Image (cartoon, rainbow, N blue to C red):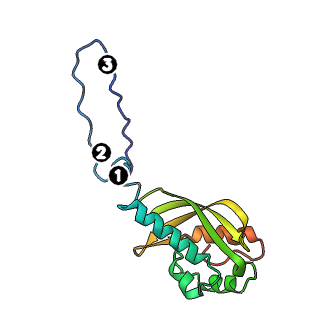
Amino acid sequence: MLILVPAAAACGDDNDAPEAPPRSPAVGTSPPATPERDAPADPAAARTAVEKSWKTFFDPKASVETKAKVLQNGERMRSLLTAFADDPNAKRSSVDVKDVKFTSATEADVTYDLLVGGQPALPDSKGTSVLQGDVWKVSVKTLCALVQLSGNAPVPPGC
């Protein structure tokens, strides 16, 4: 159960009543968000890892096996990855990661350009990365959104 505790502002007034001490969070609730919890311990290294995973995932020369390693739940999505490997546009696709913003120590919002033949096909696209098994991976949510955008295939299992 989440208990919301209103934040008290320190407002001065002319009565000299003592201020109440700050309240501790209720047992079982999360402490308030702080930058330390909203990013990995080493944000620069994590950003590099996110970018590397995205470039690997969208590398037309990368094998299905390699792509599965950098996709969230990649083993379960293997049939979809295999289908993409045979798609002519996928064989010409790559990605340019523009920005990575961590929303937690294990999740990040990614802004990227999806390139086809080196030209932006989907500029300033939004996706997400997740930390799974100590590896930053392209989220299934991102892959499923791209499949839905293509309009060529029914929504695959796992999406």
Name the amino acid type tagged 2: Pro
In the image, 88 versus 75, the foreground residue is 88
In the image, what residue occupies the spot 52% across and 74% down? 72
Q: Residues within 10 Å of mark 1 (few under 14, many from 20)?
A: few
Q: Is residue 127 above or below residue 61?
A: above
Name the amino acid type tagged 3: Gly
> From mark 3 to mark 1, how far is it between C-alphas?
29 Å
Q: Are marks 2 and 3 in contact (CB under 8 Å)?
A: no
* Coordinates of residue 131 in the picture (x, y in percent): 44, 69
Residue furthest out toward the right: 152
In the image, 86 versus 5, the foreground residue is 86
What residue is disc 2 on?
25
In the image, what residue occupies the spot 69% across and 69% down? 115
Q: Are marks 1 and 2 in contact (CB under 8 Å)?
A: yes
Q: Quadrant of residue 77?
A: bottom right
Q: Residues within 10 Å of mark 3 (few under 14, many from 20)?
A: few
What residue is disc 1 on?
30
Q: Earlier in the sequence, mark 3 or mark 1?
A: 3
> From mark 1 to mark 2, how far is it between C-alphas?
8 Å
Circle number at residue 73: none
Tally of numbered discs: 3
Marks 2, 3: nearer the viewer: 3
Q: Is residue 68 above or below residue 10?
A: below
Q: Residues within 10 Å of mark 2 (few under 14, many from 20)?
A: few
What residue is disc 3 on?
12
As drawn, is 134 to the left or to the right of 21? right
* Coordinates of residue 5 in the picture (x, y in percent): 36, 39
* Coordinates of residue 29 in the picture (x, y in percent): 33, 51
As drawn, is 93 to the left or to the right of 50? right
